[in-house]
Amino acid sequence: MSQDLAPGMLVRHPNEPDWGTGQVQSVIGDRITVNFQHRGKVLINGARITLVILGDEGGGAKA
């Protein structure tokens, strides 16, 4: 299942909201490496988990 993800995109894990915003590091087939704010780097199986793609706001905190 392709999610049309590319390195640099901002995402959230649908089942792990505490991980915060993640930035896609790489996409190789169904293997997606994401660096999350509060979890660090995680390898996601894109065939099992559909990441939530964030818009331009990125969901980050604003000062």
Image (cartoon, rainbow, N blue to C red):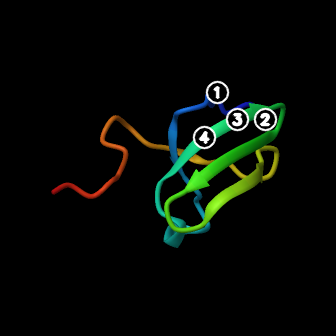
Mark toward the viewer: 4 or 1? 4
In percent of the image, x 47 and y 62: which residue is there? 20
* Up-down relation of residue 16 to residue 25 (above or below): below
Residue sitting at 67 percent across and 33 percent down? 3
In this image, 43 relative to 37: left or right? right
> Which residue in the structure is indicated by mark 1?
4
Location of residue 29 by image quarter: top right
Say which residue label 2 marks: 1
Which mark identifies residue 24?
4
Image vertical order of residue 23 relative to residue 27, above or below? below
**Residue 16, image quadrant:** bottom right
Q: Secondary structure beneath disc 4?
A: strand
Closer to viewer: mark 1 or mark 2: 1
Q: Residue at x 64, y 48 (%)?
A: 34
Residue at 37% x, 45% y is 58
Q: Position of residue 4 (x, y in %)?
A: 64, 27
- The earlier-in-sequence mark between 3 and 2 is 2
Q: Is residue 56 left or right of residue 38?
A: left
The 10 Å Cα crowd at callout 1, few under 14, some 14 to 19, many 20 or more, is few
